[in-house]
Amino acid sequence: MAPSKVLAGARVVLPTGTVDGGRVIVDGTRIADTAPPDAETVELGGHWVVPGFVDLHNHGGGGASFAGGTHEDILTGVRTHRLHGTTTVVASAVTGDLDFLARHAGMLAELAQQGDIAGIHFEGPFISPCRKGAHDEQLLRDPDPAEVRKLIDAAHGHAKMMTLATELPGGLDSVRLLAEHGVIAAVGHTDASYEQTLQAIDAGATVATHLFNAMPPLGHRSPGPITALLEDERITVELIDDGTHLHPAALQLAFHHAGAARVAFITDAMDAAGFGDGRYMLGPMEVEVADGVARLVEGGSIAGSTLTLDRAFKRAVTVDGLPVEDVVAAISANPARLLGLDDRIGSLEAGKYADLVVLDSGFDLVGVMRRGAWVVDPRVG
């Protein structure tokens, strides 16, 4: 058991607002109300303390893939993102052969059972060939509820989200099936109209997969899925704030219409996150990463990102000008709520896990704590 600690003198972001000169008491793995007599005091004057980041949509990092890697590959990716403040991560698969996806889901479920990942997100194969992005068109299929159920069952209770083009045959029935089984139905990689998207929301969809990307643009006569997803209070919109996937004005538009309570920052990271430029595989697709931007070798489509959530946090505050409290909601509290984990993570409150990030005055990461133990110690280096 890690020694008890009092993190003192920091700007602490709580659900009720920011406290200057605040403190966070860590007793074992949890945040506590009162400090034991032998608690160690860690002075963090001039720093911010915010909840650990929660990533709903992540394909890997550190040179390793969540989408097709081994146990050790998955753990390498998890460790890489923890070093960048992501204390909770959902492992995202990409389009593949259905039997392979089912087998891989079984392996990911073991890691979820151990607590290394928070669950599984299936991005594909039930997506539109018109908006396939970095997915192999030969492996795409309509969302047959029986096949959707096969993947849910293969995840042994750890399926958290599935991205669907809900306008395809079987799409709405698949959304209903996911909702019945407590799995988030996410609208994405879709060519749906405004009206079709509303039908999906009424059927139970609650998330927009990387809003704006891999869907029809907003039009004044054909408002498309973007308008439907932004205007409906039942939808949380994923945003990739890396400066490549979204123009800053598009991000501001989403925040203005959805509000901070309905935004979830994600990375959509692939293997190169926290690793570097070069050639990689995203599922069966070859990717070239140059200057931190990942694109398919064939066709040049953007292929996920090399983003880490500490960079997204800093950009959201320093470039986009968003309030720190709104960024904390989008990067911690909202995704924790979507995953049904907000009783344990997502905010700095007594009784919850001591998952937190320490940022300096310029919003660069200097510390990460998970379950009460330092992953990155702010007192070292």
Image (tube, rainbow, N blue to C red):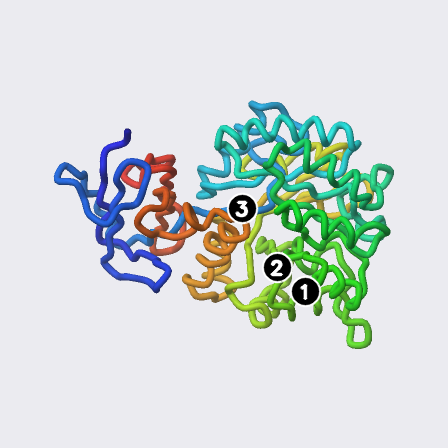
Q: Earlier in the sequence, mark 2 or mark 3?
A: 3
Check the image and report above or below for 376 versus 340: above
Q: Nearer the viewer, mark 3 or mark 1?
A: 1
Residue 201: x, y in percent?
70, 61
- Whole-percent x, y for residue 287 in the image: 72, 37
Q: Secondary structure at mark 3?
A: strand
Indicate the position of residue 60 as horizontal and vertical percent values: 60, 36
- At x 84%, y 52%, the residue is 168
Q: Which residue is mark 1?
A: 229
* Quadrant of image for the N terminus: top left
The mark tally for this picture is 3
Q: Residue at x 27, y 39 (%)?
A: 379
Spatial CA distance of label 2 from label 3 is 13 Å
Separation of disc 1 and disc 2 at Cα?
7 Å
Q: Quadrant of the C terminus?
A: top left
Q: Are marks 1 and 2 in contact (CB under 8 Å)?
A: yes
Give whichever of discs 3 and 1 has the lower sequence position: 3
For mark 2, give the secondary structure.
strand
Do tag 2 and tag 3 residues touch (Cβ < 8 Å)?
Answer: no
Q: Tag 1: residue type?
A: Leu
Does 191 appear above or below 31?
A: below
- Mark 3 nearby-residue class (10 Å; few <14, some 14–19, many ≥20): many
Name the amino acid, label 3.
Asp
